[in-house]
Image: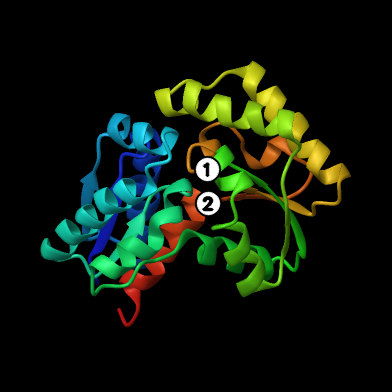
């Protein structure tokens, strides 16, 4: 079994499900008391959020590149950035290490393609929804049409992520808002919706929508297990 390296803490609330999904999946696939070989570098999200807010992405990239290097030195055979937004600096991370980066967009795009869908909505931070680093990779590699909510809805989704979900708060009021945003994306032609922030899966579940929801945390974790168990 290969060792998985996680860059977590973005926020730590969603790093916990990563750890759970990976270990449970390894146990289910191998049986017995098996669990994952795993190394975690958890950053202080307070520091990173300041860099995000101020647009200091080169510094954010250097922070994550340093984390990736520490994982490689600790024996990791791959690295995961446990956040959608921070895949904006994925090239800096890839350049810093010799081990492969398991990219969240690839795990997600493959899952959507397996379902036979062509047009999907995307929820996430405003960085993820409004910039193209995630959407373009999904569109170009998997032939998908990715649409985003309107400006007011984007503000709502972003505000709930940073104001509530990253702080461990889930509320029925916010769930209702997200459900409506998903419904509006469905009306706009989305055949499914990507939960493109690793915290959103803490709030929305499959039963909250009439169309498929693609939880990037779970899909990314499963891709890591696929890598770890290749040849096992």
Q: Would you call the spot at circle 1 few (<14 residues within 10 Å), some (14-19), or many (20 or more)?
A: many
Residue assigned mark 1? 197
Q: Which residue was labeled with disc 2?
A: 216
Residue situated in front as seen by the camera: 133 or 139 = 133
Instruction: Answer above or below: position of 179 versus 119.
Output: above
**Circles 1, 2 touching at the beta carbon (< 8 Å):** yes
The crowd level at tag 2 (other Cα within 10 Å; few <14, some 14-19, many 20+) is many
User: Residue at image x 59%, y 69%?
Assistant: 110
Point 70% across, 72% down: residue: 143
Say which of marks 1 and 2 sits in front: 1
Q: Quadrant of the C terminus?
A: bottom left
For residue 66, which quarter of the picture? bottom left
Q: Circle 2 sits in a helix, a strand or a loop, which is it?
A: helix
Report helix, strand or loop for mark 1: loop
Image point 62% across, 38% down: which residue?
205
Is residue 130 visible in this depiction of the protein? yes
The disc, 1 or 2, on the residue closer to the chain's N-terminal end is 1
């Amino acid at each position: 079994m290969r060792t998985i390296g996680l860059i977590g803490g973005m926020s730590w609330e969603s790093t916990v499900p990563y750890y759970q999904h990976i270990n449970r999946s390894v146990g289910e696939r191998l049986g017995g008391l098996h669990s994952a070989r795993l190394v975690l570098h958890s950053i202080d999200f307070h520091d990173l959020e300041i860099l995000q807010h101020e647009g200091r992405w080169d510094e954010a990239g250097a922070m994550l590149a340093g984390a990736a290097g520490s994982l490689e030195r600790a024996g990791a055979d791959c690295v995961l950035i446990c956040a959608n937004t921070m895949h904006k600096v994925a090239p800096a991370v890839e350049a810093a290490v010799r081990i492969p980066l398991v990219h969240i967009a690839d795990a997600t795009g493959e899952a959507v393609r397996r379902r036979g869908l062509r047009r999907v909505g995307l929820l996430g931070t405003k960085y993820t929804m409004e910039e193209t680093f995630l959407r373009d990779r999904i569109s170009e590699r998997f032939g998908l049409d990715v649409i985003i909510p309107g400006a007011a809805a984007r503000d709502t989704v972003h505000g709930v992520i940073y104001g509530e979900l990253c702080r461990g708060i889930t509320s029925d009021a916010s769930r209702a808002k997200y459900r409506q945003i998903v419904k509006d994306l469905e009306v706009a032609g989305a055949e499914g919706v990507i939960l493109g922030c690793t915290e959103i899966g803490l709030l929305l579940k499959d039963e909250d929508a009439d169309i498929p929801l693609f939880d990037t945390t779970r899909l990314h974790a499963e891709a890591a297990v696929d890598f770890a168990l290749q040849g096992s």
